[in-house]
Amino acid sequence: MTGQALTSLLISALALPVSCRVNQRVPKKMLIENGAPTSADKRLINDTIEEVQWVAALKPNTVGVAEYRDNEREYLEVAVLSITARHPAQGDGRGAAKRPANATRLAELVHRAVPYPVLLLLAAPQGVFLSLAHKRWAQNEIGKVVLDGEPVTANLTLDLEAEHPFAQALALDHQPQNSLLVLYQGWLDCVTDWHAAQYTGTFTMSDTPAQAAARREALRNCQRLESERARLRSLAAKEKQMARQVDLNLALKRVNAELASAREQL
């Protein structure tokens, strides 16, 4: 399956009502003006994005889900965007896009450029990415919206099928409907469940917000412990002193035990 085909599959999997569909092309200039703080970021957007499509706008009057407001944030709308990044061979004639786009940075820039929370589907040469990021009011600038933490992104496999439990879990009517904030968190939890499945081998949805939070914490532990395991393995491979090798191997065993325990919490 191609990246564009998978993107179309995922948009269909969202099962969005006609009432919220926009299906409008967005000029790259808007992303550059609102989400590119450096010249390198401007080049990344300009040279690697082929097309930006505004798929849908989820509002109380288009999906029947209430807006959300508190002192930290307001969710009046959730935007669904689809972006196609250029293949390296599709350069602009001036040597642009010779390497695959930095998908992680590109997704972050898109989230920063749009004032609403975004469900982003990014089809890049190295895969299709589903990315979400919460928003909140800036602390020092009245009226400005900033990211609330790092974007949560899943690198999806191109063999994903419509019958896969993850694809089915994305459907709008499978998300909590209390408010747009809670709905958006439901999609974020789906991405967490996808990451957990990379460890467990089986995709299962979190049953409650408490379970989803515990799974997020377990995932953070797994990622931290995997990084530590890689660091220890690298040190052990380079170490020449026998006593130090023993210490590193013992530390590696402890980390492996902790990692196995963290995986069980998923």
Image (spheres, grey):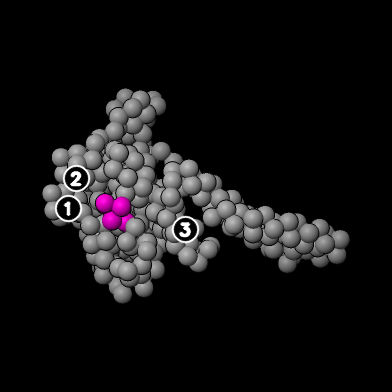
Percent x, y for residue 25?
16, 54
The residue under label 3 is which amino acid type?
Answer: His
The numbered mark, 3 or 1, whose residue comes first in the sequence reads 1
User: Which dot marks residue 213?
Assistant: none
User: Mark 3 and mark 1: span between their CA atoms?
Assistant: 28 Å
Residue interval drawn in magenta: 170-174
Q: Are marks 2 and 1 in contact (CB under 8 Å)?
A: yes
**Residue toward you, 118 or 231:** 118
What residue did someone put label 1 on? 17
Residue 250: quarter of image: bottom right
Q: Is residue 37 visible to the viewer in this orientation of the structure?
A: no
Pointer 2: what residue? 63
Q: Nearer the viewer, mark 3 or mark 1?
A: 1
C-alpha span from label 2 to label 3: 28 Å
Q: Mark 2 or mark 3: which comes first in sequence?
A: 2
Q: Position of residue 104 (x, y in %)?
A: 41, 55
For residue 229, above or below residue 176 = below
Q: Is residue 47 left or right of residue 62?
A: right
Q: Crowdedness of circle 3 by 10 Å Cα count: few (<14), some, many (20+)?
A: many
Q: Residue at x 30, y 47 (%)?
A: 118
> Is residue 172 one of those drawn in magenta?
yes
| Numbered circle sitting on residue 195 | 3
| On screen, residue 117 above or below 247 | above
Name the spot of residue 78 as percent of width and height, x first: 26, 44
Callout 3 secondary element: helix
Residue sitting at the far front: 207
Relative depth, front residue between 259 and 152: 259
The vertical placement of 40 against 3, above or below, is above
